[in-house]
Amino acid sequence: VTPVSVEEPSDLALLRAHAAGDTEAFASLVRRHQDRLWAVALRTLGDREEAADAVQDALISAFRSAARFRGDSAVTTWLHRIVVNACLDRVRRRAVRPTSPLPDYDLAGPEVDTDVALDVHAALQRLPSDQRTAIVLVDMEGFSVADAAEIMAVPVGTVKSRCARGRARLAIMLGHVRNPDAPADVSSETSATIELSGREAQP
Amino acid sequence: VTSTQPSGRPVDLDTLADYVEGVLDADATAEVADLIRDDPAWASTYAGLSAAQPLVATALSSIPDEPMPVDVANRIDGAIRSLDRPSNVVPLSSARARRDRSVLSRGWLKAAAALVLVALGIGLVVRVAGTTAPTGSKSATSGSAGVPMLAPPSGVKVTASGTDYTKSSLATRPGPENAPQATAGGSSATRRPAIAGPGAVSSFGPDRVSSSLRRLTDPDELSTCLSAVAQATGGTPAAVDFALYEHRPALIIGFADLAFSVAVGPSCGEGGAGAALLGRG
C-alpha cells in the first residue's frame, strides 16, 4: 500500500481559510508559528507575563484583520510585525509608567565601568528597544535584514545600523570591549569619553 | 613610538558601529577612517569592536530557544477560539484609535473606575432594597428598552460599562456597601456566592459587551467562571463588569471580601481554562 502524502496547507492558505470562515484554520496557523512569536516577544520584552499578553493581543489583532491581509509579505512576516508592534507598544507604555521605568543605559555610567560583565539576557534588556528588537530578529531569530526591515517597517540600512549599534553596546556590557572611560584607563593617554550620537543611519 | 595624537573628539560608539557595519555615507566613512588612523582612542575602540563581533554573535546564539509555555499557548488558544469571525469584529484601525484615546485619557482611568465601582455599590443597595427585577430563567428577558438582559447569578451585580481598566484601577476595593449581605440568593460576605439562582440586574447593556465576552452572558457560563474565580482567589465575587482590561475584552470582578478586583479573559471557566486571570489589583 502506497502511503498517502498529505500536504500541509500553506500559511497563506490557512489565513485565507480563516477569513472564509474555517474555524480551525487560524488556530492551526498560530500553532505553527507560536514558538517563534513567543521567542521574539520574550526577548524583546524580557518579561514572561508581558510577552504572553503581547502575543495574545497581537494574535487577536491578526485574527480580526486577517481578511485585510493583502499578501504583500509572507504571512509569518506579517504575524511577526504585529507581534513586534504589540511589544513596542508595551515598551513605550512601560517607559512612561513611573513605577516601572525602562532601565537607562549610559555608556559613561558607573555600571559599565565595573569589571563584571553582564549576563547576556540582562545586557540585551539594557539595549534601547529598537536596537534590541533588531538584534532579536536578525541575530537571534535568523531573519534576513530585509525581512527584519519589513517587520519593523524601517529601511534596511536602519536595521543594519540598529544591529551594529546594539552589538557594540553588548560588546562593552559583556566585557568584550573595554570602555575607554573606565577607571583602568584613566591614566592612559588613550582615555576618552564614548558618546552616543543617537542618530541612525537611514540609507 | 607612535605618531598618532588624540584628536580631541570623543569616541562616538554609534558612529564607529555604523562604520564597522558599512552604513555610513562616503564623507562620514572618510572622516571616521581619518580618526581611526590618527587618534589612539578611536583606533583602540575600533579594534576592540571589530574583534568583539564574533564574540557577541556567539553570546547571542548561546541563548537557547524556548518554546511557548503550555499555559500561555492554552490561554491564547482559548482567547482566539472565543472570538467571532473576522467580518464581525472591530477593524484594527478602530481598535488602535480606541487604544490611543485610552492612552491619552489614562489619567482619568482611576476616576472612571472609581465611578463605576460606586455605581456598582448603588446597584447593590438598590437590589438589597428589593427593587430589582427578579429573573429565574437562563434565557434572556427584556429590559424597559426592549434590550435583552442577562439573568445573572444570584448575589452578583452585573454591569457592562465598557470601561478600560488598568492594573492600578483594579487595586480599588468595590466598597463595603457592595457586600451582598441580603441578596436574593441569600449569600453573605463570608459565603461563596449562590450563583445558581435568580439574580438582579440594574445596568447591564448588552450592546456594550464585547463579542468575545458574549459566552459569559449566559448565566451558567458566568456561574462556572465565577466559581473558578472564587477558587483561584478565595474571594466571594460580588460584582462583575463586562469591560476591558488593558485594552482587551475582560470581565472585571469585584469581591465582597477582598480589597481588590480581578480581570479575567473571555475563556474564564471554559473547558478547564480555570479563571483565565488577566490581572489583579
Image (cartoon, coloured by chain):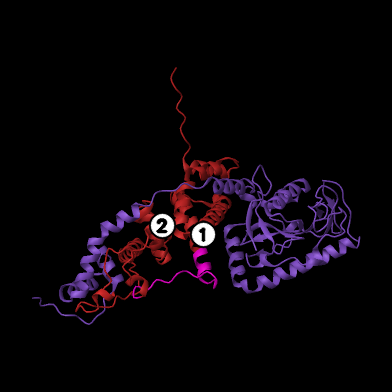
Chain colours: A red, B purple
* Chain of the residue under label 2: A
Q: Is residue B3 left or right of residue B149?
A: left
**Neighbour tally class for label 2: few under 14, some 14-19, many 20 plus, Cα within 10 Å:** some
Coordinates of residue B120 in the picture (x, y in percent) = 78, 64
Q: Residue furthest left?
A: B1
Q: Is residue B178 left or right of residue A142?
A: right
User: Which badge, 2 or 1, comes first in the chain's sequence?
Assistant: 1
Magenta span: helix, strand or loop, mainly?
A: loop
Coordinates of residue A126 in the picture (x, y in percent) = 41, 66
* Magenta stretch: includes residue A179: no
Q: Is residue B226 left or right of residue A43?
A: right
Q: Measured along the vertical axis of the image, is residue A167 above or below residue A21? A: below
Q: In the rendered structure, which amino acid carries the disc numbered 2?
A: Glu
State the mark number for residue B223.
Answer: none
Tally the marks: 2
* Magenta stretch: includes residue A103: yes
Residue at coordinates 36% horizontally, 74% vertically from top-left?
A: A110
* Chain of the residue under label 1: A
Could you say whether the residue bearing mark 2 is in a helix, strand or loop? helix
Q: In the rendered structure, which amino acid carries the disc numbered 1?
A: Ala
Q: Which residues are magenta?
A: A90-108
Closer mark to the observer between disc 2 and disc 1: 1
User: CB under 8 Å between callouts 2 and 1?
Assistant: no
Q: Residue furthest right?
A: B130
Coordinates of residue A131 in the picture (x, y in percent) = 38, 64
Residue denoted by label 1? A86
Front residue of this view, candidates A191 and B146: A191
Front residue of this view, candidates B239 and B177: B177
Front residue of this view, candidates B120 and A82: B120
Residue denoted by label 2? A150
